[in-house]
Image (spheres, grey):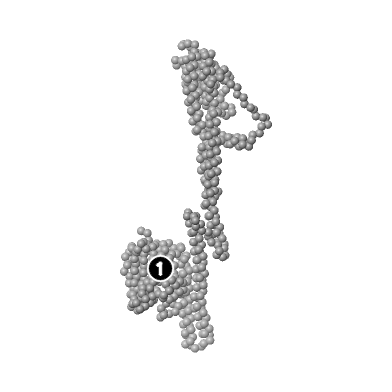
Amino acid sequence: MVRIMFVNALALVILVGSVLYLNEFRQNLIEARTAALSVQASIIAGALGESAVAGPESIDIDPAPARQIITRLVGPTENRARLFATSGGMIADSLFLAGDKELIEEPLRRLDYQPSLKEQIVNRLHDFLDAITKEISAPANIDRPTVRSTDLIEVEQALAGVLTSQIRQRADGDLVINIAVPVQRFRRVLGALLLTAQTDDIDTIVRAEQMLTIKIFVGAFALTILLSFFLGRTLVRPIRVLARAAERVRRGIGREERIPEFAERRDEIGDLSRSLSDMTGALYNQIDAVEQFAADVAHEIKNPLSSMRSALETIQMNDKPEVRKKLLAILEDDVKRIDRLITDISDASRLDAELTRSHTSVVDLGVMIATLVRAYNTTGKLGDIELAFSDDEAGVFVVAGIDARLGQVWLNLIDNAVSFSPAGGRIQIKLSVKNRTVFLTVSDQGPGVPEGSEDKIFSRFYSERPSEEQFGSHSGLGLAISKQVIEAHGGTIVVENIGAEGEGETGARFVVTLPLAPA
């Protein structure tokens, strides 16, 4: 939440900081004031050149009419005008000329006056604004009664016939604008007029803009913090709730802890809560499956162990050779059964990890099954059973998966069909594609699946074997492993009966679906 507030406020602070840095705004105001003063100074200089001379051939300015013109034209303004002769001396200064003057009375502060808290804050704020505002570099202002043209470079240039502007800095830090204009008559320089304007009003305008910006910033900053807090509560609080719930689930002994679902939310937080809840449910299901698997393993191993224990006890009590031979054969079968169980159990226990770690590749089911069918027909494992497959076209039935595990599924299904097929029977394998899904069917002509066992046969250690098959020759894990592999590939596997007894052809059909690989 702090990071959200910081990021949201940082952009606002940078924007306001750039606005408060009003040097360009101040410079534009000064340039506009300079242009206006230049026009005003040129008008006054023209009036002096026409009216403050003794005659057409005069080379000097007459001080009396010059002071009168300056008083009349400059007096109503707040500007200051100083007139210099060509010799460098100052002829007139509007500051000391009579005009429309008035006395302004301002109350003085008490000597023991203490500024209020508001005034202290405003003063500190002004100091801060002055600190971040870049000062304009300007020479010092010269303001003494005996000033001469040589003290002011702008006046010297005006006496040379060039209108010159110069910004100078007073002792208190404020700026003044000097405009020096030559006083001419028939292009003959008679003197120089220096018009000076203060920039206090410009500083006031800039300061007012800064204060207005700060007020807007305070309001916008407060609104940003409130919105950031709302955003943080909206995002951070549910994430914190989910994290704490996940921690309780991790440490919890019982199953009363569940991930809360923000079902009313249709955003990413709601998706996250539902995903975590589903993941927790899947974790509990996996724990149940592991527990059930361990119980099933213990039960399946105890059966041959009990048989072995009985056989050993009987051997110790019986000395008949034929009985001992039978008991030894039972022991040998039980040892083989235990070895088969351990091998299949080890394979089943590694399956989850292997499916998680292995990388998928493009698998062409047409080519793979055609290869398996040729291998079965070549090795002679089928006897007089026919294994038919014709959909061996390459590049059509392509899926993404782990080829070794998919091949294990097809081997399990074919072996299962072979074990239930009667002599001279036929096993049919077909492939088809519909709606971006590959369908694979393995059909046999056996007795079919017992009624109500369509789902049970995919359970671990569940086995429905032909009566003539030797007991214990299968662990009951083949179809369970096949179902787990197919579902890990995003597919399904089901079994159905082709017909019923007394209705002619019978058999079982396994139907496997897998998503077609992207082009």
Foreground residue among 370 and 4: 4
Rendered residue at 51%/62% (across/down): 280
In-image side of 44 versus 429 (left or right): right
* Crowd class of label 1 (few under 14; some 14 to 19; many from 20; radius 10 Å): many
Assign a secondary structure to mark 1: strand
Q: Residue furthest bottom?
A: 320
> Looking at the picture, how far across and down is residue 90, in whole percent?
55, 17
Rendered residue at 43%/65% (across/down): 487
Q: Which residue is mark 1?
A: 493
Q: Residue furthest front?
A: 264
> Looking at the picture, how far across and down is residue 491, in whole percent?
41, 65
Q: Is residue 148 visible?
A: no
> Looking at the picture, how far across and down is residue 369, in whole percent?
35, 68
Q: Is residue 232 above or below residue 421?
A: above
- The total number of labels drawn is 1
Foreground residue among 80 and 350: 80
In-image side of 257 versus 337 (left or right): right
> Looking at the picture, how far across and down is residue 259, in whole percent?
53, 60
Q: Is residue 63 above or below residue 230?
A: above
In-image side of 298 versus 120 (left or right): left
Amino acid type, callout 1: Ile
Rendered residue at 34%/66% (across/down): 432
